[in-house]
Image (cartoon, grey):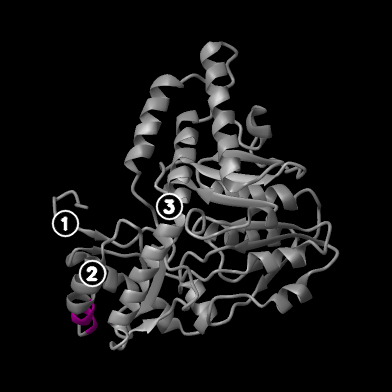
Amino acid sequence: MYNIKGDKMIYFDYAATTPVDKEVLETYIKANQNFFGNSTALHKLGIEAEYMHQKAKQEMFALFKLEKYEAIYTMNATEANNIAIFGVVRKAKTGRIITTSIEHPSVKNVMKELEKEGYDVVYLNVNEEGLISLNDLEKAMTKDTLLVSIIGVNNIVGSVQNIKEISKIVKKYPKAKLHVDLVQAIGRLDIDFKDIDLFTFSSHKIYGLKGLGVLCFKNNIDLVPILYGSSVQLGLKPGTLDVPSIIANTKALKLLLQNQDKNYNYVRKLNLLLRKEIEHLPILINSPKNASPYILNISLPNLNGETIQRLLEEKGFIVGTGSSCSSKTKEVEPTLYAMFKDEKRANNSVRISFSYHNKESDVSVSYTHLTLPTIYSV
């Protein structure tokens, strides 16, 4: 991988975005050439485009082993999360919503808005492993709970919530629905989608194209629209569908899911190797041992995250700091602060996120033996 100057770069920010897979891009180009018609049009090209839209959607559900689910395609997962949460909650004028203190901004900021509207929002705390207490969830549930919204895999440290047990608790309350942000989980970890009422993900995190998010939900859930226009996509996301991107998204899912176990084992090997390489250094590892192996968050005691990121980039390594959707803000990184209650540790962190594209040499030689110790000594 090279930057615009032609310098070789080692990319460790796959949690922020992934490159488009070559086969996915080829699928997109071919679909754009053959199915460019507006899927709402009644002529032959429109009918063909709508057929391919429905075909791609049903193939996606087959990959997820789901029946009686609906899907709408959005611009991104942020939009999908907004449509899901507002869509469920605004069916009632009042009620309780339960979420966590470590949600992505596209969920957290929706909750802040709903608080202003008078809804009772409960934020569950997490422990030092980034996990909520199931007992706390049980205590927070009431007959007036409308929605529980939980991030499946945290985007900062990779903590993996126990969605199966969370689902069992939510199902005890007929009015309540479970929404899960699966952006960092799809194609990486095993998921029983049947446990979830609504879930969201983003195509550009699975080697698909930017500009496509997906909201899947049980087809007996009636969502209140927050966008207004035509009746396309149940009126929840009106406008012209990008059918070629939808087709390419299903192709990306197929490729990733068929290699999921192989990729997981390889990335886990990289994660464990890097943990071993830095264990002798005075570096704090923020990601719990049972986190998703695709994310490893660390803190250096003497440098803030932006400085670490810049110094690593100068040496040819690309890493992330916090959520890529809010990395330019000056607030203390909320996930790490929620876990450790340590402002300095939160601010002095960077996120290393892996892919099957990475090589062992990226982790075992250049990165740890040369770069991290040099930066630590700055």
Q: Is 99 situated above or below 84?
A: below
Secondary element at tag 1: loop
Q: Which sits in the foreground, 354 or 346?
A: 354
Q: Are marks 1 and 3 in contact (CB under 8 Å)?
A: no
Sequence-first tag of 2 and 1: 1
Q: Which residue is mark 1?
A: 8
Residue at x-position 31% and y-position 65%: 319
Q: Which residue is mark 3?
A: 259
Q: Is 209 situated above or below 164?
A: above
Q: Which residue is mark 2?
A: 312
Neighbour tally class for label 2: few under 14, some 14-19, many 20 plus, Cα within 10 Å: some
Residue 15 in sight in this render:
no
Find residue 308 and report its image quarter.
bottom left
> What amino acid does circle 1 point to?
Lys
Residue 216 screen position, x and y as percent: 63, 45
Q: Are marks 2 and 1 in contact (CB under 8 Å)?
A: no
Residue at x-position 47% and y-position 58%: 188
Neighbour tally class for label 3: few under 14, some 14-19, many 20 plus, Cα within 10 Å: some
Residue 111 screen position, x and y as percent: 64, 60
Q: Is residue 373 magenta?
A: yes
Sequence-first tag of 3 and 2: 3
Q: Which sits in the foreground, 32 or 277?
A: 277
Q: Is 329 situated above or below 249?
A: below
Q: CA distance from mark 2 to mark 1?
A: 13 Å
Q: Is 232 situated above or below 259?
A: above
Nearest-to-viewer mark from 2 and 1: 1
Q: Which sits in the foreground, 332 or 294?
A: 294
- Which contiguous range is marked in magenta? 372-376
Q: Main secondary structure of the magenta part?
A: helix
Q: Which sits in the foreground, 115 or 80?
A: 80
